[in-house]
Amino acid sequence: MSRTIDSILVPTDGSDGARIGARRGIDLAATIGADLHVLSAVDSRDIEPDLNSDGQTDRERLLEAEAERAVDSIARLARAHLSRQITTAVESGIPFQVINDYVDTHDIDLIGMGTQGRTGFERVVLGSVAEKTLRTADVPIVTVTPDGDIVEIGDQRYDNVLLPTDGSEGAELAIEWGITLAEVFDATIHTMYSVDTSRFGGVEGAAEIHDALEQTGQEALETVHERARDAGVSVAGNIASGPAARTILSYSEEHDIDLIAMGTHGRSGLTRYLTGSVTETVVRNAAVPVCCVPMQ
């Protein structure tokens, strides 16, 4: 495989959205044969400053008890499907920082999490724990929307993996991870490059701009084809026309895509981009899990 996945982290706050993400994380761990870590963070900002004689507030004890129940619930579900090690933890701090610190300390390879928890992710990313984790994590995150399909753990198939590319370094890293997952599931890679000239309509030289973008796209697609062929993975790809997020979502629906893998940062500037804003739009609206790969 292009990348090794030995350990998967599932953050939970006990919400339905977190449980949906956890089921995907457990399913991935079961298929890949990875260790599973289940983590719940007690938000230190919610703890009252006045302490009791035992050094804790009533509020802190309540939050810790809720976190323990959330972790235990996911761990019980995982034990029914995993033979590998399951580690549970409850820690206090700013939730996204707790997640990132845990990733560093325990050498986590991948995070699986729902996009709606008690902080209210819904269709708006900004301000959520998931969004902050997406922006700061050093490892890929597989996100799952609250209206995604309920997974029967062990039965989920990923037959078609979509790898959008813009030829940037961020896209290159996403290609590695997408191919890794395609190898695990014996999936077909679909790759696409979006040519968006809507901002150049009526501008002199628009046709030349289109041709230049299309040439860049062909080169980017060929890179994916070469990587996939070297890994022995089936691959199909084409150039799409229109804004990146819209074409990615449309392609996913039209081709029965099971997983989208894309970088969280890409080419910037007026001509092309697959930046955080495009990734966040796809994460918010995709009906399938999205593997978000950071530049690190």
Image: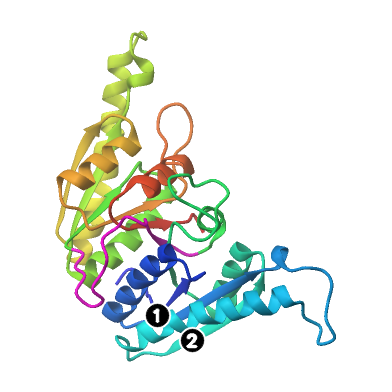
- Residue 7, percent from left and from top: 43, 79
Question: Callout 1, which amino acid?
Answer: Asp
Q: Could you tell me which residue is drawn at 26 percent across and 32 percent down?
A: 215
N-terminal-most mark, 1 or 2: 1
Question: Callout 2, which amino acid?
Answer: Thr
Label 1 sits on residue: 6
Question: In the rendering, which numbered label is found on residue 87?
Answer: 2
Q: Nearer the viewer, residue 27 or 5?
A: 27
Quadrant that contains the N terminus: bottom left
How many marks the image carries: the answer is: 2
Q: Where are the magenta residues, as a range?
A: 139-158
Q: Magenta residues: mostly which secondary structure?
A: loop
Relative vertical location of residue 218 with respect to residue 135 in this rendering, above or below: above
Relative vertical location of residue 23 with respect to residue 146 in this rendering, above or below: below
Q: Is residue 153 on the magenta stretch?
A: yes
Q: Nearer the viewer, residue 218 or 126?
A: 126
Using residue 41 as the reference point, say whether residue 167 is left or right of it. left
Badge 1: residue crowd in 10 Å (few <14, some 14–19, many ≥20): some
Q: Nearer the viewer, residue 164 or 74?
A: 74
- Residue 222, percent from left and from top: 23, 46
Residue 118 appears in the figure = yes
Using residue 159 as the reference point, say whether residue 23 is left or right of it. right
In three-dimensional space, the C-alpha distance between marks 1 and 2, rounded to whole angstroms, equals 13 Å
The quarter of the picture where residue 77 lies is bottom left
Using residue 290 as the reference point, say whether residue 93 is left or right of it. right
- Residue 51, percent from left and from top: 83, 77
Q: Is residue 114 on the magenta stretch?
A: no
- Residue 96, percent from left and from top: 59, 62
Q: Could you tell me which residue is drawn at 32 percent across and 14 percent down?
A: 206
Using residue 123 as the reference point, say whether residue 241 is left or right of it. left
